[in-house]
Image (spheres, rainbow, N blue to C red):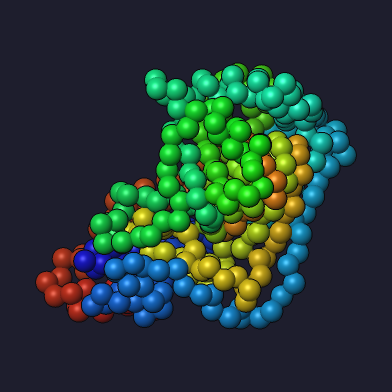
Amino acid sequence: KCADGLLIISDVLASARDLPFDSFAILKGLCENSTIIDGSSEQASLSFDGLPLVEASPSPSPRKTKNVRVIDWSIVEEDFGGNFTLFAVEELSQSREPLIVKNTNLLRYGAVEEWLSDDFSAFHDALQGLENEEGFLEGVRIGEPPFYFWDPDQTLHELADWQFKFSNASLSSKTLLNAIFKKDPKEKKHYYYLGDMPDELQEDINSTHMFLTEADREKNGQYIWITTEETITHTHCDMDFNLFIQAYGNKTFEFYAPHTMHHLQIFPRIHPLWHKSQITDYSNLPPTLTAHLEPYDFLYVPPYWFHRVTSHSPSISITSWSLAYDHYERMDGIYRYEPKYTRLAKFPAILYTMRMYLD
């Protein structure tokens, strides 16, 4: 049942030689971690009646984690004529590593304090605009971290009998905000919400400079995260440019460079947790870079950088997505490609021919 997924990945690799290095490393690693034959995997140790997370393999060489580079916008602003979009396109999008930018004023200073004043009435009113007809915010996750998104459209969805430690719920804005900002110290449950950026808060954000292209501005892929303290987002990577603002509270991003993905033991592409790590114990795998975010910090996250995010306090974050159009164009070409070896009658012949491409 996994052969189709394996062949899809091999098709990608067969035509991926002109992809950017990071993209090819990701694809090659996915294939290496999903070589599934007769219901078992040689490297990922997957089992179909649970597909459990696994322990980390020893790091190939112990290393010290470095902090993400920090840029002060007030110092470089004049070099870009005060145009943050120009800075984002010429500096950020060309960087191969995450970057923190301080003093951007992309989120108006003092705005968040106004949102949360008077028993967070302004914030509550803004979130009410996202409630459904019954007066609830949908998709609130409640339970134990780490939190992650399950993709039911993937082939292995029906085969993976996954045991979630959190549940999806619908809560009113008032209930959610009370649970996050007035949490009882004895309460062990964590709350995690991701939704569209409320229109009422847009006037406090310079969204013009939060996207890399005009097409991205029109799509307006901008979202708000609201979480309790000690909330953890599971290690994963994204395929687009993430321009992120820490609006309230403190967060830590632990980054793993794309070339380390083999050690993260990524789920296969056909699994509902694809582009996420199977690891639960990171003691033998320190991150490549660490970013400690304070209120109003701006963070740039390049495509394919794996990251694990921890909230150290009640937290509000804003993220804006800009698509990696060149990658999508290449991938579209790859997925339209049909190599002739897939028409061979016997699976062993297909597998042997596929491996010739990899060798």
For the N terminus, the quadrant is: bottom left
Does residue 297 appear in this view?
Answer: no
- Taking the spot 61% from the left edge, 33% from the top edge, the residue there is 178
Measured as percent of width and height from the top left, residue 136 is found at 45, 27
Q: Between 122 and 13, which is closer to the camera in this rendering?
A: 122
In the current view of this chain or complex, which residue is farthest to the right?
Answer: 75
In the current view of this chain or complex, which residue is farthest to the front?
Answer: 186
Location of residue 182 with respect to 59 vertically, above or below: above
Location of residue 334 with respect to 347 vertically, above or below: above
- Taking the spot 34% from the left edge, 63% from the top edge, the residue there is 9
Measured as percent of width and height from the top left, residue 331 is found at 40, 51
Does residue 117 appear in this view?
Answer: yes
Measured as percent of width and height from the top left, residue 15 is found at 37, 61
- Taking the spot 75% from the left edge, 72% from the top edge, the residue there is 64
From the viewer's perspective, tell me whether residue 354 is left or right of residue 80: left
For the C terminus, the quadrant is: bottom left
- Taking the spot 39% from the left edge, 20% from the top edge, the residue there is 133
Location of residue 329 with respect to 271 vertically, above or below: above
Give the quadrant of residue 179: top right
Give the quadrant of residue 340: bottom left
Measured as percent of width and height from the top left, residue 67 is found at 76, 59
